[in-house]
Image (cartoon, helix red, strand yellow):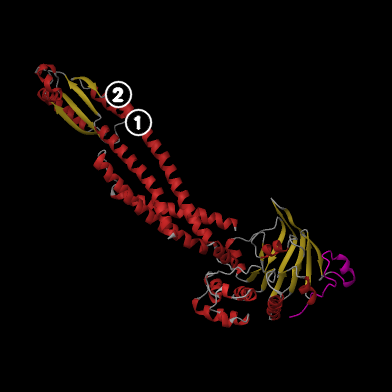
Amino acid sequence: MLSALGVVTIAFSIFAFGLFGLVAINIRNALEQVSERVEVRAFITDSTEIESVAAAMKDIGEFPEVARVDYVSKEKALERARSEMGEFADVFEAAVLPASIEVHLRPGMRGPATVKSVADRIRTYQFIDDVRYGEEWVAKLYRLRNIATVAGIALGVAFAAVAIIIIGATIRMTVLARAKEISIMRLVGATDMFIRLPFLIDGLIKGILGGLLALLFVWVANRVINEYVIQTIFFDRQMIFLGIVAGAMMGVIGSLVSVGRHLRRV
Amino acid sequence: MIRLTDVSKEYVRSGVALADVTFELKKGEFVFLTGPSGSGKSTILRLLYMDDKPTRGDVWVNGVTSRTARGREISRLRRRLGIVFQDFRLLEDRTAEANVRFALEVTGAPKATIRAKVSRALTQVGLASKATSYPRELSGGEQQRVAIARALINDPFVLIADEPTGNLDERATRGVFQLLRDINASGTAVIMATHDLDLVRRSNYRTIELNHGRLVFDSADTPVSAASGALSFDSVDTPHDSQESV
């Protein structure tokens, strides 16, 4: 009974940790999606021959930072503009919009400095009229990502610490309930490791069970949010595994701390 | 076998518990440790089983010195000591037999030998017939016998007893004390803290007296004539010859 209560307590503390994790991966996912739209667009001078453009595209495609290069013809540019403008579609004449090449960058290569260096290299082609990549916007996005990462780590550590403290307190109740037994064990010459081991196993099992239960809670919460609030993603298999390992670790650390403290005091 | 050399113990909160205590305990000896409450008797015993370390000086027990002793070495030493307390320290939810067996189980003793050892120890303390009784079904004297059986289970070279008769009535006290004498007669040294001076007076074992953490009297090195003056703990009227052979 006491240990069922312990497992539920641990589950709730890991649940808080898990919910936070869910928010964190969703923010990251959203930023990832936005940053996929980071692209460099190079406008081509009207008279340029298509062969030169094709050769340049091949060159650019071989830049290590570049994932994909697309050619946007005048007609396609017009079509796009029209579809985006809806009822004002007619304002555009074919001649207004230049052809361009769109350069998509690889994940991890979308930082402000990288984007700028790619843009600068593209600008060196003679037939390139202008290169645009939304400098400010890229910088802002990156700042946001950095803030999210730092806040994520800090909050994650805080939540993990709270979980460890709660697990430690839960195990401490078991330790105190068996304090007399422990003191006798020490008197008759049981080693500290022998005394500790059952508590470590207890912590490990409670951590794993608590982790699984917390996972269930988070899954339900995620379903509810998906149903009624916004579309979110759930942990992938690797993260689920890591989460349970983290639960187990928190269980072990929590019990190490509380048993260790008790053994030092006796 | 056991030696304390200039041992002092100070606690941050309560101050000096022991000051410059030196004595030696020979193999198979029986020693009373007497003195008023708070005089340092229990502290000395705790130092002997290395539950605490001296602030200064050295405690030497069967080749283990308090200067260097660490976890595993201390555990191993305790398996060669028998320790009993005033409050018995039995596990209430286990039978007498299980309480005794516990001491073997938690030290990883081979299973095959446990049963025989437990029954021998219970027989030795005269409780073979109460093996399946729980502590609450036993009298105080019987509970202390169970605790003694547990202490004897590993064939200790010394039995450390901290006021073992402190919670017992006159009759049970005599029984338990006789048991300790028998144990001593079979070769195990006994160091017994007590303030039951009747008990001390009736037997002629070596007596060490403490007061305010100082050793004020040791019948082993005090000539008979000088002894009575040295006794501030006033009921012991004659010091005894400590070298009782076994």
Residue denoted by label 1 = A144
Say which residue appears at 27% left-offset and 44% top-offset.
A224
Quadrant of residue A22 within the rendered picture: top left
* Percent coordinates x, y for residue A183 in the rendering: 58, 63
Quadrant of residue B67 within the rendered picture: bottom right
* Percent coordinates x, y for residue B244 in the rendering: 77, 78
Residue B240 magenta-highlighted: yes
Q: Is residue A61 above or below residue B151?
A: above
Residue A180, which numbered label? none
Residue B111 magenta-highlighted: no
What are the residue bounds of the magenta stretch?
B222-246
Indicate the amino acid at tag 1: Leu
Give the spatial CA distance, label 1 vs label 2: 14 Å
What element does badge 2 sit on? helix
Residue denoted by label 2 = A135
What element does badge 1 sit on? helix
Indicate the amino acid at tag 2: Glu
Badge 2 sits on which subunit?
A
Q: Is residue A199 above or below residue A222?
A: below
Badge 1 sits on which subunit?
A
User: Dot 1, how many residues are within 10 Å of its Cα: few (below 14), some (14-19), or many (20+)?
Assistant: few
Q: Main secondary structure of the magenta part?
A: loop
Q: Nearer the viewer, residue B136 or A6?
A: B136
* Percent coordinates x, y for residue A124 in the rendering: 24, 22
